[in-house]
Image: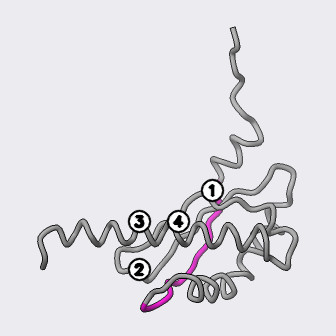
Amino acid sequence: MKPGGMKQGFRRADRVSKEIKEVVAILFSRYASESSLSSVTITNVSLSDDLKSARIYYTVFPGVDRKQVAEAVERSQGWVRREIGRQIPMKSVPKVQFFPQEEAEEFLENPLPIDLE
């Protein structure tokens, strides 16, 4: 193993996670055939160390039917994975799983009051 090899692995996973986040955000905002996907914000991507599995976390705009969005997101998994493979050079494309990030959604719906005094 090369000196610092472990750190290089983490840097690659971090870099690829960032690239996946950008690709998926653009896909949902610009190219999604289902309008409900345009209300999705990608908040984080967690990639396994071996780069074979990507957990993609998202929030939904307030007032949008979360169940409908969750179903649309699930249906988009194959399309998203294909597009990741097309746009990011990798030996193998990670398996994609989506997870709603409830805490962020709750904060957007009920933001903390700001004390301006």
Q: Which span is picked out in magenta?
A: 91-101
Q: Are marks 1 and 2 in contact (CB under 8 Å)?
A: no
Which residue is the site of mark 2?
51
Q: Position of residue 74 (x, y in %)?
A: 71, 78
Q: Nearer the viewer, residue 19 or 66?
A: 19
Q: Are marks 3 and 4 in contact (CB under 8 Å)?
A: no
Magenta span contains residue 10: no
Q: Are marks 3 and 2 in contact (CB under 8 Å)?
A: no
Sooner in the amino-acid sequence: mark 1 or mark 2: 2
Specify the amino acid type for callout 3.
Asp
Question: Label for residue 101?
Answer: 1
Sooner in the amino-acid sequence: mark 4 or mark 1: 4
Q: Is residue 56 found left or right of 27 in the rendered image?
A: left
Sooner in the amino-acid sequence: mark 3 or mark 2: 3
Instruction: Report helix, strand or loop for mark 4.
Output: strand
Q: Position of residue 80 (x, y in %)?
A: 66, 81
Magenta span contains residue 98: yes
Q: Marks 3 and 1, how far apart in space?
A: 19 Å
Q: Marks 1 and 2, how far apart in space?
A: 22 Å
Which residue is the site of mark 4?
45
Sooner in the amino-acid sequence: mark 3 or mark 4: 3
Q: Marks 3 and 4, how far apart in space?
A: 9 Å
Question: Tag 4: Cα neighbours inside 10 Å, few (<14), some, or many (≥20)?
Answer: many
Q: Are marks 4 and 1 in contact (CB under 8 Å)?
A: no
Q: Marks 3 and 2, how far apart in space?
A: 10 Å
Question: Tag 1: Cα neighbours inside 10 Å, few (<14), some, or many (≥20)?
Answer: some
Query: Going 53% across and 84% down the picture, which residue do you hit?
Result: 95
Question: Label for residue 14?
Answer: 3
Q: Is residue 52 found left or right of 113 in the rendered image?
A: left
Specify the amino acid type for callout 1.
Gln
Sooner in the amino-acid sequence: mark 3 or mark 1: 3
Instruction: Report helix, strand or loop for mark 2.
Output: loop
